[in-house]
Amino acid sequence: MVTLEILSSLTSFIIQTISNSGYLGVFFLMVAESALIPIPSEVIMLFSGYLVSTGKFDVVPVVIAGTIGNLVGSLIAYAVGAYLGRGFVLRYGRYVLLKKSHLELAESYFKKYGDRSIFISRLLPAIRTYVSLPAGAAKMSLKKFSVFTLIGSAIWNTALAFVGIKLGQEWDSIRRYSDYVDAMVIAVVVIGIIIYWKKRKVSGS
């Protein structure tokens, strides 16, 4: 788990990158996030969703950029696991804040759930970043790996972008508490759904 100071700095970096580089910024950040660099996808997609609400972005290109970025980054991590192995990751992982405990958690998850863990893990904070490594080491079918990654990532990214859109002007509050975004993401999703449901109920009454 990255420290609060580092996560705060990452949040500012993400916002600046997306603001300056648009959809390409979303793509490259999500590549990095899935290629073992601990950049929180929650911040990337929530902020991108916010920009959709302001009219600067369109939601479909945002989700596509994020999802394709996830696939590319995951394939990189898969290749690291398949061709460089566990020892390489343990030796050099510290340079990207990858701890042995991160790898062991992902390995345990993959061992327990098998191929379907690739789909499920794309919907889970933390594990989603590292599970590609044991999948590569186990030589999982590349076709299955890619399909499960695409579908799971598309669902995750769409949900986060949707929340960012619906919260709209509440982005400043999200950013203020983004140090805790990994732990809060489920709560944020629930809050977004409640707000949307209440608005629909009022408009329908």
Image (tube, rainbow, N blue to C red):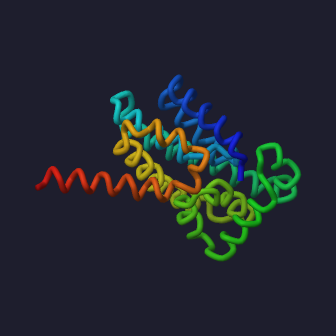
Q: Is residue 143 visible?
A: no
Which x, y percent locates residue 166?
34, 45
Q: Residue furthest bottom?
A: 112
Q: Which of 175 and 149 lies nearest the eye of the viewer?
A: 175
Q: Residue at position x 75%, y 57% from top?
A: 82
Which x, y percent locates residue 22?
48, 28
Q: Which of 181 and 153 lies nearest the eye of the viewer?
A: 181
From the viewer's perspective, is 154 left or right of 15? left
Q: Which of 43 and 111 lies nearest the eye of the viewer?
A: 43
Q: Residue furthest left?
A: 205
Q: Kindly indicate the quadrant of the structure image that contains residue 131.
A: bottom right
Q: Residue at position x 56%, y 44% from top?
A: 178
Query: How many discs appear?
Result: 0
Q: Residue at position x 72%, y 58% from top?
A: 133
Q: Which of 125 and 117 lies nearest the eye of the viewer?
A: 125
Q: Residue at position x 29%, y 52% from top?
A: 196
Q: Is residue 80 visible?
A: yes
Which x, y percent locates residue 89?
82, 53
Which x, y percent locates residue 105?
72, 66
Q: Kindly indicate the quadrant of the structure image that contains residue 48.
A: top left
- 109 in relation to 158, above or below: below
From the viewer's perspective, is 142 left or right of 67? right
Q: Quadrant of the image for the C terminus?
A: bottom left
- 192 in relation to 106, above or below: above
